[in-house]
Structures are given as C-alpha cells and as structure tokens.
Image: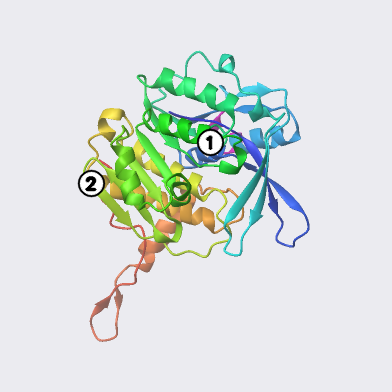
Amino acid sequence: MIVSCGEALVDLVPRRDGDGYAARPGGSPANVAAGLGRLGVDVALLARIADDGFGRLLRAHLTDSHVDLSIAIPADEPTTLAVVTLGPQGAAEYTFYVEGSADGAWESGQLPSKLPDGAACLHVSGSLALAVPGMGDTLESLLRRERTRRTLTFDPNLRPRLSRDPAQLRARLDRWITLVDLVKVSSDDLAWFAPGEPVEAVAARWRGRGPTLVVVTRGAAGVHALGPDGPVDLPAPRVRVADTVGAGDAFMSGLLAALDQGGRLARDRLATIPIDTLTAALTHAQRVAALTCTRVGAEPPWQRELDAEHAGNLRASRPRATGQGGVGLQGHMGDGLPPLT
C-alpha cells in the first residue's frame, strides 16, 4: 500500500463557455491518491476532509477512484478551495482559500498512531504544507516519525504566494529534502528555489543531501532524473493539451505505480534501481500525465485507458504490405519498454 498525505480540496475551474466555474476534486495528495487507485495500486489518503457539500464531493470522487479513506480525518471546518486561472496554453495558476478551512486546522494530535499495515511508502506533497505553518509542522512530525519505517516520497509543488514567510518555506523545503528517498519537482519550482541554476545542477545537489532519486519535470522539455546509475533525460510526448491541471500529480502517481508494481518502491530496492528500469518507470509516468493533459481538470486515467491506448498502438505498429513486397512500420509510443525488474 501507498499512503498519500496532505490536502484534499476543491478546484474551481473556469467553464469552457466562460460562464462561471465548475467545482472539481483536487489537491495534490488527493490527486496522487486518485491516480494510484485508478492504476490499480492499493492506496490510502491521509487528509482532513470536511462534512460539507464539497467534502461529500471529494469523498465520492476518491471512493469511486478506489482510494481507502479509513485514515482520513473528519474536519468540522469547510473544504479548502483553490480558484484556477488558465493561461493561453492551458497552464494553471491557483488562488487558495485556506484560512479557516479544513487544511488550515491541522494538528499533530490528529494523526493516526500508526499507518495501515503493509504501507510500504508514504507520499507527501508540499503544496500547502510547506506554506501553512500548522499543516507543515504536523506533516514534518509525520515524516520524522515514519523515516525509519518505510520509503518516503515528496513533491514540493511550491505555492510561494501562499506563504507569509518565504524564508520559512525555503527552510522547511530544505529540511524535507534530507528526510525523503525520492523527490519529484517541477522546473518551475526550481526556478523559484534556485533561480538561474541548471536543473541538472540542483538535482545533483539535492541527491547529494539524501534522496536516492531526484526527478525534474520540465513540461514540454521533458524529464530529467538522477538516480543511482546516473542521469536519464527523456523528451515529452506530444499531445493536444486541454489544460495542465493535475498533470504533475498524474506524473507522480504514474511513477509511484510503476515503481510499486515493479517491486522497486522499497528503500533497498530503490537504491539499486538500474537505469533501464528507471527509464521505463519515467516513460510510464509521462504517459499517465500526457493523458491527463488531454482533458479538463485533474482527471488521471484509469489503467484500462492505458491498456486500450497501448493495444491501439500495437495494432497501429503491426507490419503492413508496402505494395512492393516489403514491410513498413508505423510509429507508436510506449512499446518495447524494458520490464520493471
């Protein structure tokens, strides 16, 4: 099992006709959990979920996505909201309403005394936790408690405008990097944290501070990763983008699913991951994120959709007569990957 921890909130996304907003389930850890559940991974969400209309929307969405909510914390406060603004290329910007909400009232005493049996990995997103002191203190105590018990993964998913103290946000991010085994970070986050530095240099510095694997997503520029066998650089798949809401979370769920299903998520197995296995896992994560970008909102794909896409690519790539007695092949994506061993 993988436990994803942090916020579960509602995104208010602009309607396509420009007439107001549509309420969609969101929050980076909740998105990752939903993505994992849809990919067939046993997953639980540790989040504070309100008992209001939006909270019921979140519970239904997560349950339908096969997410275990047995350790979710009931919240008396209203659901946290994020108002989404989309740029001309579908890039998303967020305005958060946290004060007085479910995610503004985290306390360490609310944490379960232990995580579910069989939880091999704890994933934490820093999106709100790095910026909101009470939430950050609570999740940091959880990371320290679980450090010797299971693999820890982390996506900073920075929201600097949410923080009243950017220096404190930086300091917490700096501490969390030393606690975890895997960091997935966007190039936009690195541009804020280390302006002007090449992502390769920052990834190498971060890996030197503790994580086994550092992965940098670079949007249309693809992915850079640094693991025990050295760097991996992959181009981005080409897709027609509806928006990028939840794309990074979908990538994270795809990466964790590939590592988990390949038996590589345990700390000792992650520390010896070969470069071809890492490449396969990153490619799978890119496919999951690419499909998410083709639809509105944080809607990660189901495993059956990936299977259907793969089957379609296989049919398209079958040998066909060229008319001159020869054989031709049509290009396809996602085939011929090495096994996740």
Q: Write down the region rendered in magenta.
A: 63-68
- Displayed quadrant of residue 209: top left
Q: Is residue 201 above or below residue 48?
A: below
Q: Which residue is mark 1?
A: 29
> Which residue corresponds to the image point at 46% horizontal and 32% vertical from the top-left?
171
The front one of 2 and 151 is: 151
What amino acid is labelled 1 in the image?
A: Pro
Q: Which residue is mark 2?
A: 230
Evaluate if marks 1 and 2 touch, with contact meaning CB atoms under 8 Å apart: no
Q: Residue furthest bottom?
A: 324
Observer-side mark, 1 or 2, equals 2
The front one of 21 and 144 is: 144
Q: Is residue 213 visible?
A: no
Mark 1 to mark 2 CA distance (whole Å): 28 Å
Neighbours of disc 2 within 10 Å: few (<14), some (14-19), many (20+): few
Q: Residue furthest right?
A: 19
Neighbours of disc 1 within 10 Å: few (<14), some (14-19), many (20+): many
Where in the figure is residue 44, as x and y percent of width and height?
Answer: 51, 28
Q: Secondary structure at mark 2?
A: strand
Where in the figure is residue 55, as x and y percent of width and height?
Answer: 69, 32
Determine if the magenta segment contains residue 66.
yes
Numbered label tally: 2
Q: For the N terminus, give its image quadrant.
A: top left
Q: Secondary structure at mark 1?
A: helix
What amino acid is labelled 2 in the image?
A: Gly
Q: How is the model colour-coded?
A: rainbow
Determine if the magenta segment contains residue 9.
no
